Structure formats: C-alpha cells, structure tokens
Image: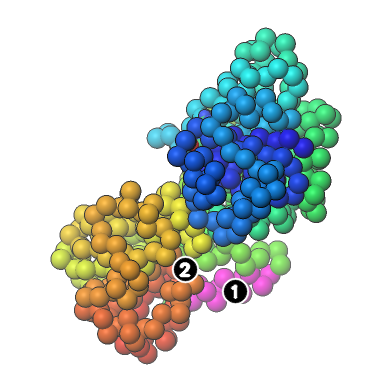
Amino acid sequence: MKLSVIGTGYVGLVTSACLADVGHEVIGADRDADRIERLRQGRSPIFEPGLEEVLARGAASKRLRFTTDTVEAVRESDVIFITVGTPSLESGNADVTAVAAVAETIAASLTDYRLIVEKSTVPVRTGERIRDQIHLLTRGAVPFDVACNPEFTREGAAVQDFMHPDRIVIGVESERAERLMRDVYRPFDCPILVTNLATAELIKHASNAFLAMKISYINAVANVCERVGADVGLVAQGMGQDARIGRAFLNAGVGYGGSCFPKDVAAFVQIASAAGYEFGLLKEVARINEGQRDVLLRHLTEALWVLANRTIAVLGLAYKPDTDDMRDAPSVPIIERLCRDGAAVRVYDPVAERNARRVLPEVTYCADPYDAARGADAVVLLTEWPEFGRLDLTRLRDVMRRPVLIDGRNVWDPEAARAAGFHYAGMGR
Ligand SMILES: NC(=O)c1ccc[n+]([C@@H]2O[C@H](COP(=O)([O-])OP(=O)(O)OC[C@H]3O[C@@H](n4cnc5c(N)ncnc54)[C@H](O)[C@@H]3O)[C@@H](O)[C@H]2O)c1
C-alpha cells in the first residue's frame, strides 16, 4: 500500500521505517528540513536500537523515502498517518496545534478519497474534530475517513515493539476505513481491536495513565518501606509473582519521565475534568511522582549534610535507558536543584549528552562514570543504564572525595556497595 507518515520524530520514524520493512511504500514527511536531510543521507536523527538497520533496508528497497513536502506526501498515498508532537500546555492540556496544522494541510491537498489516521496521542474527540475541520475546509466535496490508531511502543524498544505488538487498536467510523487499516497491519501477527474513534483514543489515555499509576504506587510503597525497614525490591517481587498484578512497572525510583507519561497523565486529568469527572487518583499519581525527586535529594542531604560547594557526580541523564530522549527527564529538575543549592555537578550518560547539553548547560560533561566521579562527594544514579550496574565499585570509591552512593534506580546491591566502603542509600530499601 502507499502510505505517508507526517512527523518523523520518535514515533513517526519508527512507524515509517517499520511499515516500509513489512512491504508498504512509505513517505515520511516532516517540516524540519535538517531532519529530512539527515534521513536522506541515511543517518537517524534519534537514538533508537535497531532503527538504523530498518532505515537502511527501507532506503535499499526504495520503499522508504523522506520529504519536507507534506502536500506531495498526501497526494501520493492512500493512508496518511499523523505522528506530530502533542506537548503539554501550562494547563496540562495537550497542545494539538501541530495536529490541527497537519489536518489543514491534508484538507488543502485532498483530491480524492484518503484515510487519515491519528497516531499522535491526542485528547479524546480529536479524531472527530479532525474529521469536522477537514469536512468544513473541503466543503464536503472530497470523500475521506478519519481513524485512530494509538501507538504503544516504548522508546528504547520501539522497533521491536512495533514489529511484535501485543495488540493493535483501531478506531474507525466506516467499513472502508476498517478494511484499509486491516490491510495496513495484515503482515503483523497479533490481535486487532476495532472500536469507535473515542474508544480508541481513550484506550491510549487509560493505558499510559495506568502504567504511570503502577510506578507511583510502588514509589508510595517504597516510601513506607523506608520507614519500616522493608525492602521494596522484594515487595515488588512478591507482588509481581501474582499473575493478577504482574512485575512490570513496579520498579521504585526517582519516578517516571519522558515525553509521554507526565504529559499524558496531565492531559487525562484535564480531559476527564472537561467531561465533568475529577480524576483525583491521577492527580495523586503525578504528585507522588514529583515527590520522588525530594526523596532522592533528602537521601543525598542526609549523607552530605549540606550541598553547597559539594561536587556531585550524576550517572544517567536520559529519562530511561536505551534512549537519548531528555524530555521531562527527572535528571533535569534534580540537577537544577543541585546547582541552585550551590553544588558543582559532573555528569555522564552513554547517549543523551547531545540532547542534555541543550537543557543542562551548567554542568560538566564527562567521558565515563569514573571520570564523572573523580573528586566527587557523592555519586547519584538517575538512569539504570546496564553498564552502571557493572561498575567496579572499588575503583569508583577510590577516585571520589567522599564514598557516597545514592542509587535513584536501585541498581546496585546495597550489601556489595557497603562492603566496598560506601555509604549507600537506595529508594525504599
Ligand atoms: N515518543 C514515544 O515513544 C511515543 C509513544 C507513543 C505515543 N507518542 C505520541 O506520538 C506523538 C509524537 O511523539 P514523538 O515523540 O514522535 O514526537 P517528536 O517531537 O519526536 O516528533 C514530532 C515530529 O513532528 C514534526 N512536525 C511538527 N509539526 C509538523 C507539521 N506541521 N508538519 C510536518 N511535521 C511536523 C516535528 O518536526 C517532529 O520531527 C505524540 O503525540 C506522542 O505523545 C509518543
């Protein structure tokens, strides 16, 4: 099939590359000319494991190409995916300006039937609004359908997730749209759930908010564990062995971040409120999440007494491992607080440095964890990159000024850290 994907960010790039890989002809369009130029040269603008290989196969097969010309992309495809960003507004609402702009461009380019698929995470009823606006702009002269196909891939495992989804959700309003969407996803072997537009949109909100809730739940439990001498890791293990609960997303730490959970939880609260329901549970999920930064800073202050004129080494900046994404990463507010309190901060992240330099200009970027720890009064771990779990703790201790380890993701074995001579504090252990 001929497909286009408008917006070649984390979601759009994976979507276009993977859909080309399964045999479709795909045009990826973006208004960012630098990004498109990089892609044309075969270079990925983002770090995502496995993506460069899929992009290379797409280019070699000539089934995948990139353009800045959205009009051309719309004209040359049967199905158009919208994958532009929907960041948070100050109010917590999702900013759908980019989605609305793409809908206008599509309306101006329509000459005959197209299926327009919203894949960006959008407030419920956005699909309806896209449909109504395109209908108004085209004066009902051109047939089209709007579908909702929410994206559930995880950054850091997006290619794998896209190729092997647990399920595909399709919100449609016509049989024709359903048929086309089933054709797009025919090469994938997984259950397909077909719903109306609003239900598909709600499935995305409800799924992300639930996962965020699991994280905040275990963090709240971790805070109780700290007070009563229990170990949250074992609590999570014991809970997770119950098939009704499951172990996933029960890792205590400095909280969730990234481009989805914080903004999607805030947006769901606003959506519910606009619909007349106060979603207090989700407000608490967000509050607990932000509170985890204070928990970590409290552990640090307990160990160091004061932060002014101390040197703090931070290991890990990305909001989670296997990504370079710094959007809403907990490292940013934590490091800003350290700097405000007068600490000097030395940092290391295996891949996020380029993006981090834009949001954290005041820190010293280091070549590796030992370099970051040199002369430091404490090492603070904020992202659970696997390489940090394998560090030589004795070597780390020897380059530091004070042997203090604050483990924001419970990566190290507390006994091993203490045996290596560290003052160790994890989250809820
Ligand atoms: N990042 C994720 O893992 C993830 C997962 C599921 C859902 N989502 C949702 O998918 C959407 C996209 O997220 P993302 O992380 O890929 O965003 P992103 O910011 O990485 O990418 C968005 C891209 O859209 C382009 N764009 C913006 N306006 C445009 C326009 N008018 N015409 C053409 N291109 C335009 C931007 O230049 C950018 O390259 C969001 O709604 C997000 O909530 C993201």
What quarter of the picture does the C terminus occupy? Answer: bottom left
Residue at the (57%, 55%) spot, across then down: 52
Q: Is residue 164 above or below residue 93?
A: below
* The quadrant where residue 228 appears: bottom left
Residue at the (53%, 32%) spot, across then down: 68
Identity, as a three-letter code, of the amino acid under mark 2: Trp
Query: Which of the numbered marks, if any, corresponds to residue 146?
Result: none
Q: Which residues are magenta?
A: 231-242
Horizontally, residue 399 falls left or right of residue 260, namely left
Please name the residue that numbered disc 1 is placed on: 237
Q: Secondary structure at mark 2?
A: loop
Q: Is residue 167 above or below residue 249?
A: above
Taking the magenta stretch, the answer to whether it contains residue 63 is no
Residue at the (73%, 25%) spot, across then down: 114
Query: Which of the numbered marks, if any, corresponds to residue 385?
Result: 2
The residue closer to the viewer here, 417 or 161, is 161
Horizontally, residue 296 falls left or right of residue 209, namely left
